Amino acid sequence: MSVLVVGSVALDSVQTPFGRHKDLLGGSATYFSIAASYFTDVRLVAVIGRDFPKRYIRLFKKYRIDTRGLEIKDGKTFRWEGEYEYDMNTAKTVATHLNVLGKFRPKIPKEYRKTKHVFLANIDPDLQKSILRQISSPQFIACDTMNFWIENKKRSLIGLLKEMDLCLLNDAEARELSGEANLLKAAKVIISLGPRMVIIKKGEHGCLFVSKRRCFTVPGFPLETIHDPTGAGDTFAGGLMGYLGRFDKVDESKVKKAIIYGSVLASYNVEKFSLKKLLRLNRRLIDKRYKEFKKLTHF
């Protein structure tokens, strides 16, 4: 089994109260892919420039990430620069340079087109729809989005949601898309737009899962050390979809378990800058924190 992800691979410059780092490996598809690789094989579709360090491509391959869908174009790799203050739930974007990502038109390799589990990371919803047209009979499709697309391409986004099994978005995005301040009401409005399930991410406060039949809430794992929350949401998605990618059929009980694995991966991710903590993990450590999570929430 495997999972297909289409998104961004980037070079990030990040400043938090705990340090400043330049040209870190980043991007939504990067965090997703490394997290998912602890559970299943990953097929990556993204674009990079000629300046992208070759050591990072070798890193992808080390983690069973298939890079045949990683396009290398003339020009520079997508770059993002952000800052966090002590309230690290929200990043302040200092600069965004789309570079080769600005003209990215994803082409799904022939070998990927029968992949059953597909994750469409945060990109233009029109591109997300064009990707789906290249996939043959996917069994489980999930997507992420952001306020920019809600504000500027809401009609396209709503059209996309009709084809989704699962939609992930944060609390502010859920409120904006639904027009509801209450997150439970917001989730129900979003489900009425098409997806079977919705996960609303609430940063350090965990997440809310809602379907037509049930509601499931998960706290954030309590941490004493948080150095860099960049990529936490994408890491969560990677852990979730990676776990689901092990199964032919996905039901809500499996999604609930996958949410905990996603939360575990995200909690590890924020403890170091970039992917430094994710790259030091193994299934023993992941399962250990999974069990700690269960103790934390069981009564």
Image (tube, grey):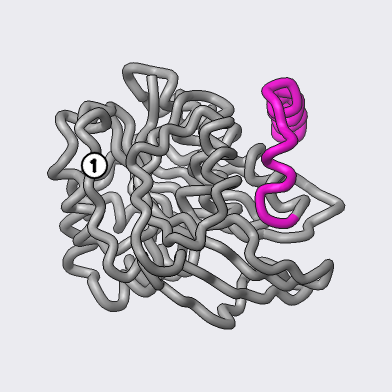
Circle 1 sits on which residue? 108
In the image, the segment drawn in magenta is 273-299
User: Which residue is painted at 58% across and 28% down in the image?
Assistant: 38
Count of numbered tags: 1
Q: Residue 100 in the image: x percent, y percent?
A: 36, 67
> Which residue sits furthest right?
224
The answer to whether residue 235 is left or right of residue 224 is left
Magenta segment's dominant SS is: helix
Asked whether the viewer can see residue 181, the reply is yes
Where, by quadrant of the figure, is residue 246 drawn?
top left
Q: Residue 89 in the image: x percent, y percent?
A: 65, 67
Q: Residue 204 in the image: x percent, y percent?
A: 67, 56
Residue 282 falls within the magenta-colored stretch: yes
Please name whichever residue, 278 or 220, is drawn nearer the observer in this view of the structure.
Answer: 278
The answer to whether residue 262 is left or right of residue 21 is left
Q: Residue 120 in the image: x percent, y percent?
A: 33, 48
Where, by quadrant of the figure, is residue 189 drawn?
bottom left
